[in-house]
Image (cartoon, rainbow, N blue to C red):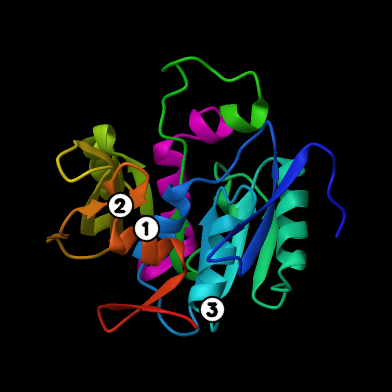
Amino acid sequence: MIRSDDESCDAFFDGRVTIYQSRAGHRFSLDALLLAHFVTVKTGARIVDLGTGNGVIPLALAILHPSIEVTGIELQASMVERARRNIAHNKLQSCIKIAHGDVRSPNQIAGGGVFDAAICNPPYRKSTSGRLSANRERQMARHEIAGGLSEFLEAGSFLLRTNGRMAMVYGAVRSVDLLTAMRHAALEPKRLRYVHSFARAKASLVLVEAIKAGRSGIEVLPPLIVYQRAKTYSAEAASMIAGARRLSGALEVDP
């Protein structure tokens, strides 16, 4: 597989998955792996990843749940090409497809109500918040330049079947924005979990899963603590990074 000079080849899930990334552009973070473990996935599910970037979430989901089909949607042509190379490099073309599409036009992505689950790691910052990176990939990954929170949620709602699930990871500081926007898109929040760097630190991220046209009532899960101490992951975070599978409420690491 050809790698350009401005790309690195990195591994996750204890080396079982390798991925090409731009050295200067968008690079995946722990957020994506936490989200892949958080979403509820049923056997044989059809899943759409909105704003797939380099394809890291589809790759993680395909390893964790071999029976599923995942479609990654990405707006930037350069990242579509890289994501497709990553899928081919890991020999997962049979269960992962990467499509060039815009979440602001979901009817051009697929028909309405065709997916069992939608997953999204969208930009956390408003277009006017903070300093924009000079790199276009990083701009679009961090700031709501080509679609904001409501556009991603409306796209997910359109693409999901009734009672389908949408899972997102978002900045904890915008939790109210996220929950409000979910309800506006007919996505009822059902599971919520805050992510903290350390046990006594403020939450930095929130993981939320909603059901399309679901009834009200939300389960607030125990907090997810990333680090036990400086540079040492908690047991749960380490299991996720290693590529654990959640079965019957327990984390099970593949041999």
Q: Which mark is residue 212?
A: none
* Nearer the observer, 202 or 154: 202
Is 2 on the left-hand or right-hand side of 6?
Answer: right
Query: Which is more foreground, mark 1 or mark 2?
Result: 2
16 in relation to 171, above or below: below
Mark 1 residue crowding within 10 angstroms, few (<14) / some (14–19) / many (20+): many
Q: Which x, y percent locates residue 138?
A: 59, 30
Is 149 on the left-hand or right-hand side of 228?
Answer: right
* Nearer the observer, 117 or 170: 170
Q: Amino acid at mark 2?
A: Leu
Query: Secondary structure beneath disc 3?
Result: loop
98 in relation to 254, above or below: above
Sequence-wise first label, 3 or 2 = 3
Q: Which x, y percent locates residue 51?
A: 56, 47
**Image quadrant where residue 198 sits:** top left
Disc 3 to disc 2, how far (Cα)? 21 Å
Q: Quadrant of the N terminus?
A: bottom right
Q: Which x, y percent locates residue 143?
A: 49, 28
Mark 3 residue crowding within 10 angstroms, few (<14) / some (14–19) / many (20+): some
Find out whether residue 208 is within the magenta segment: no
Mark 1 in CB contact with mark 2 (< 8 angstroms): yes
Q: In the rendered structure, which segment of residues is drawn in magenta? A: 140-167
Mark 2 residue crowding within 10 angstroms, few (<14) / some (14–19) / many (20+): many
Q: Which mark is residue 68?
A: 3
Q: Residue at x 44, y 61 (%)?
A: 241
Q: Mark 2 = which residue?
A: 207
Query: Secondary structure beneath disc 1?
Result: strand
Is 53 on the left-hand or right-hand side of 93?
Answer: left
Q: Mark 1 = which residue?
A: 167
Disc 1 to disc 2, how far (Cα)? 7 Å
